[in-house]
Structures are given as C-alpha cells and as structure tokens.
C-alpha cells in the first residue's frame, strides 16, 4: 500500500484513539485531569506548531537542545509560581496595602490581565482566520464577529454554570488537540521509517549560536507560557491540587515538545523555509497530502483550547483584583469584554509583541514576590532566593530584549 494512504490512516486512527480515551475514560473525567487541562491547554497553544520552524531556522540541528533549554527555563519559572501558590497566597491573604508583596501582586495582576486580554483575542482571531481561509474568505470584519460570538457563548456558559462549564469546553478541545497532536507525531514517526534517508529534501540551516539567537529563545518564552493559569484557579481547586496539576501539565507539554522536535529532525530544513504553521504544514503535506487537514485541525483546536484556558485565568485575575467581591460570572464577563475590545480596536497580530513582553514582566514580578515572601516569612534559604533572583533577571532580559515570536499565520 502507498504511504499516502497508510500514513494518514494510521495518524487518524491514533488521533481518534487518544481523543476517545481522554473524553470517555474515567481518568479523562477526573478532577485531577480537568485541573491539569487548563494550564496544559494554554502551554500547548498554536506555538506548538510554530516553534519547530523557528528553532530550525535559527538553531539548525541544535533545535531540540534549544527547545530543552527553553522548557527548563519555563519549568523553573513554573516552580516560582508553585512556590507562590503555596506560600505567597496565604501571605497575601493577611497582608495590608503597604506590604511589598501585596503591591507587587497587584501590579502583576494588572500586567497579566493585559497579556491575557491580548492573547485570548489573538488566539481566537487566528482560529477565525483559519476557518475563513478554508472557506475562501479573508475578511477581518467577519473574523471579529466570529471571535465575539465565541466569547459570547463562553460567557453564557460562565453565567449558567461557572467556570466548570467553561472548563468542559477546554477539556473537549484539549482532548481533540492532544489526539490530533498524537496523530501528527505518529505520522512523523511512520514517515521517517517509511522514507528512511530520503526523508526531507532541504538542507538543515547552519546554527546561529550567538547573542541574537539567545534573544530569539527568550522571545519564544510565550510559546510555552500558560502554566500560571493554575495560580488563578483558587475558586475551583485547593493549593495542593493546583501545584500538582501545574507540574503535571508542564511535564506533559515538555514531553510533547521534545518528541515533536526529535521526530521533525529529518525535515528541519524543509520546516525552516516557511513561516508559522505553514512550516509544519509543508512538512506534513510532503509526507502525505491528506495530513494537511490534520495540521489545520490541530491549529484550530490549539487556538481554541489556549484561548479558553487564558480566559479562565483572566477570570481569576478579575476576581482577585476585585478583592473577591466579583463572582465567577461577573469576572468572566469582564475578561471576555476586555478581549472583545482588543479584537475590535487593535490589530492583535501586531500587539502579540506586547503580550510577549507582558508575560515576561509578570514572571519577573512573580520572582520578586517569591523573594519578598521567602525573606519575610522565612520560607526559603538564600540559595533558593538567589535562584529566584537569577530567574527574575532572565525575565527582565526577555522583557527588554527578547525577540517576539513571529506571527503564526
């Protein structure tokens, strides 16, 4: 049988099996998995399909080690957020307005609210443009209407059932997304075996291991961002659950990213010659033309799940900023309203650079909060506080100098 039949058929079978297992199994419906889904949905956004071509173009055969460095940095920053869930949250609950950690937390919430409003609009705008492109249209007006309609439906779900109903949307979209990603990974693995040494047609670019490459890597921090959503799910889950499931989400995402980059190795040269999702689309089409539909479906599912996850995080921020005077429905309405405003009054593809820097600023602030709480409440030693300080400096460097990830169209 031809590879153009076997490979897509195998990929589709894997995708269906994983999706069914996550949606129908007892594990897939457990609170532990549902609490893992929200940060996981945001971490594996559409950046999953973009990082390969970007890293291939800049780091060549060192793309996988570069990704590993980025993931280690993200996991370390996630450790700071987990420390703050365990120790800063109780501290902030008792702190007054003059407390340094309280002031930093307020600033961080405002910064993250801006970042989330931009990122939700950005993800949904990309989703709408993909859908319109498939229908032969490129109308930004219609895309804005679609984004507004999606946010309206999510707001209705929040009004009728709180974040749990919105989380069900995230759960379904993540299940589909992980199934599709599993199918893509299976296609790459089978394609490598099927084509052997002839896999890939373009030479791998020469690695640029210089200061500019480092700035690009720092700018890519936004592609593995999202774990911080666990910090703002306190209305639904206790601290131990959020800490544990955030760690699980980061480890699962890291495994997927690394396996994807490893399996993409024979096609790094092909991927490097295209921008955004088009790079992976070209690779998968080269393996077997029907796989293009799988890539586009994965891109749409990734954008929806990431947008929903960030909307959930944005709701948590609105509730905290109000001193918990707002409930979940009102918090979600405010978060959705901000994203609608970004959608209609800005070019969200351009302002993703703002979101990238806002997330870096937020992480730097989280490091500052961790240092203050660790020192004030004696929750960590000097070595750990020095680690928080080093991560803060890295985040400030990403804020000031990081090269924003390219558009993902």
Image (cartoon, rainbow, N blue to C red):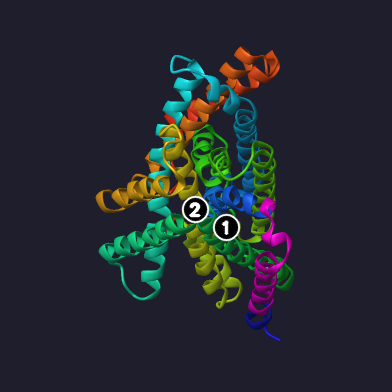
Of badges 2 and 1, the one in the foreground is 2
Kindly report the secondary structure that dominates the magenta region of the rendered protein. Answer: helix
Task: Measuring from the top left, give residue 191's x and y in whole percent.
Answer: 68, 70
Q: Residue at x 52, y 46 (%)?
A: 223
Q: CA distance from mark 2 to mark 1?
A: 46 Å
Q: Residues within 10 Å of mark 2 (few under 14, many from 20)?
A: some
Q: Residue at x 42, y 62 (%)?
A: 127
The answer to whether residue 17 shows anywhere in this view is yes
Residue 322 colored in magenta in the image? no
Q: Which mark is residue 183?
A: none
Q: Please, is residue 404 above or below residue 152 in the view?
A: above
Residue 30 colored in magenta in the image? yes
Q: Which mark is residue 269?
A: 1
Front residue of 138/2: it is 138
Q: Residues within 10 Å of mark 1 (few under 14, many from 20)?
A: many
Q: Is residue 239 left or right of residue 330?
A: right
Q: Which contiguous range is marked in magenta? A: 8-32
Task: Measuring from the top left, give residue 177's x and y in whole percent.
Answer: 58, 63
Q: Please, is residue 40 above or below residue 279 in the view?
A: above
Front residue of 40/269: it is 40
Front residue of 365/282: it is 365
The answer to whether residue 403 shows anywhere in this view is no
Task: Measuring from the top left, give residue 178's x and y in whole percent.
Answer: 63, 62
User: Disc 2 designates what residue?
Assistant: 162
């Amino acid at each position: 049988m031809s590879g153009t039949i076997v490979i897509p058929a195998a990929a589709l079978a894997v995708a269906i099996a994983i999706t069914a297992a996550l949606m129908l199994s007892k594990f897939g419906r457990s609170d532990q998995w549902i609490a893992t889904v929200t940060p996981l949905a945001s971490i594996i956004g559409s950046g999953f399909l973009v990082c390969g071509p970007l890293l291939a173009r800049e780091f060549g055969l060192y793309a996988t080690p570069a990704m590993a460095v980025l993931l280690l940095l993200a996991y370390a920053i996630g450790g700071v957020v987990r420390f703050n869930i365990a120790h800063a949250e109780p501290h902030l609950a008792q702190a007054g307005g003059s407390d340094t950690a309280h002031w930093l937390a307020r600033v961080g919430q405002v910064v993250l609210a801006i970042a989330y409003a931009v990122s939700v609009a950005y993800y949904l705008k990309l989703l709408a443009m993909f859908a319109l492109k498939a229908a032969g249209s490129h109308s930004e007006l219609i895309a804005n209407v679609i984004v507004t309609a999606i946010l309206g439906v999510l707001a209705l779900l929040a009004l009728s059932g709180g974040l749990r109903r919105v989380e069900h949307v995230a759960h379904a979209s993540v299940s589909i997304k992980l199934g599709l990603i599993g199918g893509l990974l299976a296609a790459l693995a089978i394609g490598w075996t099927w084509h052997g040494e002839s896999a890939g047609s373009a030479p791998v670019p020469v690695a640029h291991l210089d200061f500019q490459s480092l700035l690009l890597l720092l700018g890519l921090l936004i592609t593995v961002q999202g774990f911080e959503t666990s910090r703002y799910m306190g209305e639904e889950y206790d601290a131990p659950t959020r800490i544990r499931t955030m760690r699980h989400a980061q480890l699962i995402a890291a495994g997927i990213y690394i396996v994807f980059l490893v399996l993409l190795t024979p096609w790094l040269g092909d991927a490097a010659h295209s921008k955004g999702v088009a790079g992976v689309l070209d690779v998968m089409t080269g393996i077997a033309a029907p796989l293009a539909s799988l890539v586009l479906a994965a891109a749409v599912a990734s954008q929806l799940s990431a947008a929903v996850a960030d909307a959930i995080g944005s709701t948590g921020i609105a509730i905290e900023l109000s001193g918990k005077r707002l409930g979940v429905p009102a918090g979600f309405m405010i978060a959705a309203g901000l994203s609608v405003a970004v959608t209609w009054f800005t070019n969200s593809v351009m302002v993703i650079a703002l979101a990238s820097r806002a997330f870096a600023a937020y992480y730097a602030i989280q490091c500052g909060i961790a240092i203050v709480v660790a020192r004030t409440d004696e929750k960590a030693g000097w070595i750990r506080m020095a680690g928080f300080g080093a991560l803060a400096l890295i985040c400030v460097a990403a804020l000031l100098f990081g090269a924003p990830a390219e558009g993902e169209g």
